[in-house]
Image (tube, helix red, strand yellow):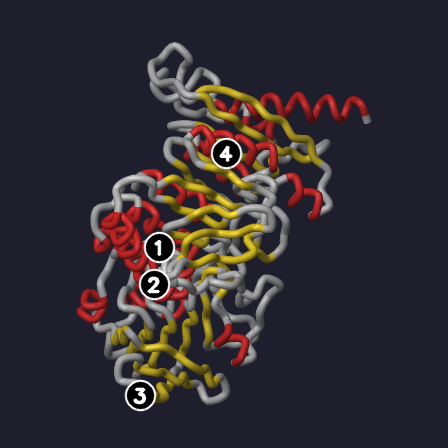
């Protein structure tokens, strides 16, 4: 290695890794910084969040989900090596052991600075039949393509009576249920929780349950899958629980993800309670001056609870990459933490949350009031006005906003952004009632639903204070 040129090695070629590479390249020329990136798959810089919409047909082509191809990265003087898996990190020796998956060759590559962006892996329950053809996870573009191939095989055999079972009812589960509905399948969702969307309080999750049932989706809650049953051809034919069997031409796993940190663990790097890498505000791995980490393999600070959480979202991963690239490139940036904002949908139902749920607030030792209101997305007299339900949590006495959940039709989901800003700013619900939000009948009632909830929360805080 040249004494005047540093080498940056990146493990992982998706959002965090390649954002870091691109930002570092903007700040430092190839003469100053050599960048080598390893990616075990075929694709880079793609939207994993878009896979359900590609599978469901809302997105036409796989390549529509790719923000930047390997060739485009290479044109920017980034030595990107696809189909190459890093097998070991030698921290004292400042080197990584990589394996070319096509040629089967292994080799060491030295680094001055290292970025770990290994992402997360989908949870795959250890069940009989779980590896049968027709059982799919949906984490990568390759996973999405494999699922589409299975669906096209199934659709080629018959045009009616196709059946899909989705295991899990989190974000991926409800989005894949929509994708299967759009493809004309009869859909059953088997969920171990009492209600879908455990990121919501159960009363709000019940609204999602009712809406999914109304769409023709069979919801089986509070139930564990015990095994995957196969037919004479070895392919999946049903999902079994302790009390029933649910026929299936295809099974989709949506039971969550876990940080992909086995490499980091073997290298002795610090991991948190949820298995993710621990970093400082600059996204540098704690205790290691020349190693950074970002994306779905790290834990982040929850600004509301003060605890570390694992949240697998592309928004965070891209921000992490920008912060890392800036710091590696000689500038300075930080990632202060999150308030836990997320939004999703199933068909025309929009689902959003930010901040703390009731059980989160209780776990943090907070005393709170909660209110729930119903309102409309537009002025009630304007065509297309749709109902939405807003739940708001506020701290007792102080009235500080703690969390918001929204379930409704068109125009509901993105209203959560107002609450996310209020949480980040540390606003009280009383301060929120004075927010100068945009109004016109096609967009909102005179009192926006968020403000209606804030007013009710103010009244609850005052009543609670008066009674105590």
The one of 57 and 391 positioned closer to us in this rendering: 57
- How many other residues sit within 10 Å of disc 2, few (<14), some (14-19) or many (≥20)? many
Q: Secondary structure at mark 2?
A: loop
- Which comes before the other along the chain, label 2 or label 4? 2
Which residue bears the numbered disc 4? Answer: 208
**Image height of 217 relative to 299, above or below:** above
The one of 434 and 113 positioned closer to us in this rendering: 113
Which residue bears the numbered disc 3? Answer: 105
Position of the N terminus by quadrant: bottom left
- Which comes before the other along the chain, label 2 or label 3? 2
Q: Secondary structure at mark 3?
A: loop
Q: CA distance from mark 2 to mark 1?
A: 9 Å
- Which comes before the other along the chain, label 1 or label 3? 1
- Residue 454: quarter of image: top right
- How many other residues sit within 10 Å of disc 4, few (<14), some (14-19) or many (≥20)? many
Which residue bears the numbered disc 1? Answer: 48
């Amino acid at each position: 290695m040249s004494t005047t040129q540093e080498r940056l090695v990146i493990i992982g070629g998706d959002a965090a890794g390649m954002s870091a590479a691109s930002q570092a390249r903007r700040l430092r020329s190839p003469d100053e910084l050599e960048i080598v990136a390893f990616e075990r798959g075929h694709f880079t810089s793609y939207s994993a969040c878009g896979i359900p919409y590609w599978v469901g047909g809302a997105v036409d082509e796989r390549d529509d989900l790719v923000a930047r191809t390997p060739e485009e990265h290479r044109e920017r003087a980034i030595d990107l090596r696809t189909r190459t898996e890093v097998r070991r990190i030698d921290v004292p020796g400042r080197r990584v052991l990589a394996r070319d998956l096509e040629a089967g060759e292994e080799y060491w590559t030295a680094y001055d600075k290292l970025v770990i962006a290994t992402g997360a892996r989908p949870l795959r329950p250890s069940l009989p039949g779980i590896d049968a053809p027709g059982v799919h996870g949906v984490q990568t573009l390759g996973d999405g393509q494999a699922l589409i191939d299975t669906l096209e095989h199934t659709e080629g055999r018959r045009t009616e009576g196709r059946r899909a079972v989705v295991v899990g009812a989190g974000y991926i589960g409800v989005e894949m249920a929509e994708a299967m509905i759009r493809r004309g399948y009869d859909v059953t969702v088997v969920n171990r929780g009492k209600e879908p969307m455990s990121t919501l309080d159960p009363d709000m999750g019940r609204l999602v349950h009712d809406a999914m049932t109304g769409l023709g989706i069979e919801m089986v809650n509070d139930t564990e899958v015990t095994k995957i049953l196969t037919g004479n051809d070895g392919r999946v034919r049903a999902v079994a629980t302790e009390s029933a069997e649910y026929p299936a031409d295809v099974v989709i796993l949506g039971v969550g993800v876990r940080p992909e940190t086995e490499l980091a663990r073997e290298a002795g790097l610090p991991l948190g309670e949820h298995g993710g890498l621990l970093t400082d505000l600059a996204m540098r791995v704690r205790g290691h001056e020349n190693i950074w980490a970002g994306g779905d393999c790290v834990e982040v600070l929850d600004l509301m609870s003060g605890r570390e959480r694992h949240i697998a979202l592309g928004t965070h991963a891209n921000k992490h990459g920008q912060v890392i690239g800036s710091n590696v490139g000689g500038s300075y940036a930080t990632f202060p933490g999150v308030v836990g904002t997320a939004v999703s949908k199933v068909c025309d139902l929009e689902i959003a949350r930010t901040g703390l749920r009731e059980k989160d607030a209780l776990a943090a030792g907070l005393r709170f009031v909660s209110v729930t209101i119903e309102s409309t997305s537009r002025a009630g007299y304007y065509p297309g006005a749709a109902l939405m339900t807003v739940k708001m949590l506020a701290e007792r006495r102080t009235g500080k906003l703690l969390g918001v959940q929204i379930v409704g039709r068109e125009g509901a989901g993105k209203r959560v952004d107002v609450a996310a800003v209020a949480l980040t700013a540390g606003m009280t619900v009383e301060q929120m009632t004075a927010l100068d939000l945009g109004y016109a009948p096609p967009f909102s009632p005179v009192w926006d639903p968020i403000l209606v909830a804030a007013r009710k929360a103010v009244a609850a805080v005052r009543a609670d204070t008066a009674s105590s």
